[in-house]
Image (cartoon, grey):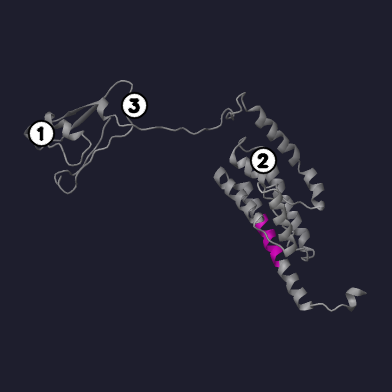
Amino acid sequence: MAFVIRRHDLRGLQAAMKHAQRKAACKIYAMQALNWLLRNVTQTTCLHDLLWHFVSSLALACGDEEQEKAGAERREQEPDIVVCEHPLDDISIAGDTAHSLTDAFHTLLQTISDMMMLLPSGSALQQMAIRCWCLNFKQTDHPFLHRSHVFSNISQILSHSDETQDDTGLYVDPPGQVTGCVELLRDLTPLADVKLSSRQAMQASLTDGSTETFWESGEEDRNKTKQLTITCHQGTRPTMVFVHIDNSRDLAVSAAAARN
């Protein structure tokens, strides 16, 4: 009776309900598209980007003032953990559309749970997949959480992570996983023998590292191909050869080629 006799802003309520339904429809289509992309892309970087956008969109979600105040209090209590907001937090008056959004939301999370165990162990991609479950779930989501087997998956991931650590506490890459390789390039010019097709005495001007000095061919190879033979010592592994050609003064140079 109190609701009946109380004055309500029906136009404002109607506008708010339409706005909530539109937001719910957009979220449904977005989650369906995201679920389709997660099931079809093959590159790990694409998967990471998709999961990152999902987390960031929920982390930036904002509802009414009370929800924002509650989120601020949670962030103050746990500053290192950012709990994402539930997609239904800001569309509580969307009506039956909220049920479709819940189905799309659960379908997307189920896809993430299924692919979680297939990702490289301990990788940033697997951590981002786990991060997608750091949500402010509602009580109505509890049956789905048990059906999704996400708790057992996370438990297996943590157990496997403990097994792949050695006694020193350093992380050991799982067998078969591609790791990075760091190479340091050094100048091998002092360790190489350079033989010129003419004017061998000017060899020092060619390898002194200065662009002001130069080597110029002599009469013995006029109208012939000029050759520079570089012989590296045993134990060295040359990767690149750099030759500086002055295009403003070396007018006779039309082409340069290297042969191993």
Query: What residue sits 61% from the left and 36% below the top?
Result: 122
Looking at the rendered structure, the kind of residue marked 2 is Met
Q: How far apart are marks 3 and 1 (CA)?
A: 30 Å
Q: Classify the position of the N terminus by image quarter.
A: bottom right
Identify the residue position indicated by label 1 in the image. 221
Identify the residue position indicated by label 3 in the image. 237
Q: Which mark is residue 145?
A: none
Mark closest to the chain's N terminus, 2 or 3: 2
Q: Residue 116 carries which label?
A: 2
Query: What residue sits 65% from the left and 32% below the top?
Result: 161
Q: Where is residue 20 in the image (x, y as percent from the top left)?
A: 73, 67
Query: What residue sits 17% from the left and 42% below the top?
Result: 212
Q: Does the magenta stretch include residue 49?
A: no
Assess disc 3: are there few (<14), some (14-19) or many (≥20) residues with their C-alpha within 10 Å of its C-alpha.
Answer: few
Q: How many labels does the image show?
A: 3
Q: Where is residue 165 in the image (x, y as percent from the top left)?
A: 62, 27
SS assignment at label 3: loop
Q: Which region shows up in magenta?
A: 22-32
Depth check, mark 3 against mark 1: the one in front is 3
**Contact flag, marks 3 and 1 (Cβ < 8 Å):** no
Q: Is residue 215 left or right of residue 219?
A: right
The residue lying furthest to the left in this view is 219
Does residue 165 show up? yes
Q: Classify the position of the C terminus by image quarter.
A: top left
